[in-house]
Amino acid sequence: MIWLSIVWQDLTQVNMTHQRLRTEFSAKLLSASSLAELKNQNLRLEQRLQLLERQLPGPYEMDLLFADMYRSGRARHLRFELLRPAELNAQEPYAHQRIALRVSGRYEDLTGFAADIAGLAWLVSIQSFTLIPTKDGRLLMDAVVRTLRPLDTASDQAATKVTP
């Protein structure tokens, strides 16, 4: 009788372990079934990232970015007082480039200029801008334009040593 009681306890313990393992297996099987979907989603995200990275200005395209910004401002009859890049902030995997910008003009021209900057071929954003009225009825826009670009180790090391 004691022997039967011990066997019964072992059987109960094995059944509990079996039930626990079956539950764990079901959970892992469920997560493994969505692995194909996750791989597809990861592939789509990588493709989107590559598309966005192509819109970042390269180290040799920064002059073109400045020229495009200046050209779009002049087309809107804005007066540039400042267009100066700050020191390059190199952080993996991209370099952050800030550009100090000060232009004056009418409100409609400044908003059109901001829209033109947003429509450039490169990814740029206007941050921390202020509008100050001037004596001649125009507005002075003081802003920081920020862009990212892929790191090019040789030219970026030289660029970070030079302080504008």
Image (tube, rainbow, N blue to C red):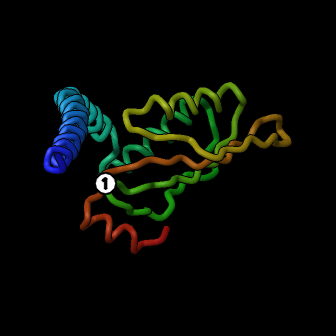
In this picture, residue 21 sits left or right of residue 91:
left
Q: Nearer the viewer, residue 29 or 79?
A: 29
Mark 1 lies on residue: 59
Q: Quadrant of residue 90?
A: bottom left
For the question of whether residue 42 can be seen, the reply is: no
Q: Is residue 98 above or below residue 126?
A: below
Quadrant in the picture for residue 16: top left
Q: Residue furthest right?
A: 135
Q: Residue 34, located in which quarter of the rendered image?
A: top left
| Residue shown at 32% from the left, 36% from the top | 52
Q: Position of residue 139 (x, y in %)?
A: 75, 38
Q: Residue furthest front?
A: 1
Q: Secondary structure at mark 1?
A: loop
Asked if residue 162 is positioned above or below residue 39 in the image, the reply reads below
> Which residue is pictured at 72% across the width and 29% down the height?
107
Q: Identity of the amino acid at label 1?
A: Pro
- Which residue of the protein is positioned furthest toward the bottom in this rendering? 161
The one of 71 and 86 positioned closer to us in this rendering: 86
119 sits to left or right of 15: right
For residue 77, above or below residue 155: above
Q: Nearer the viewer, residue 17 or 53?
A: 17
Label 1 Cα crowd, 10 Å radius (few <14 / some 14-19 / many 20+): some
Q: Name the residue located 47 percent from the left edge and 64 percent from the top edge.
A: 87
Q: Position of residue 117 (x, y in %)?
A: 50, 34
Q: Residue at x 31, y 54 (%)?
A: 59
Q: Position of residue 121 (x, y in %)?
A: 37, 33
Report how many numbered discs are placed on residues in the image: 1
Q: Is residue 87 visible?
A: yes
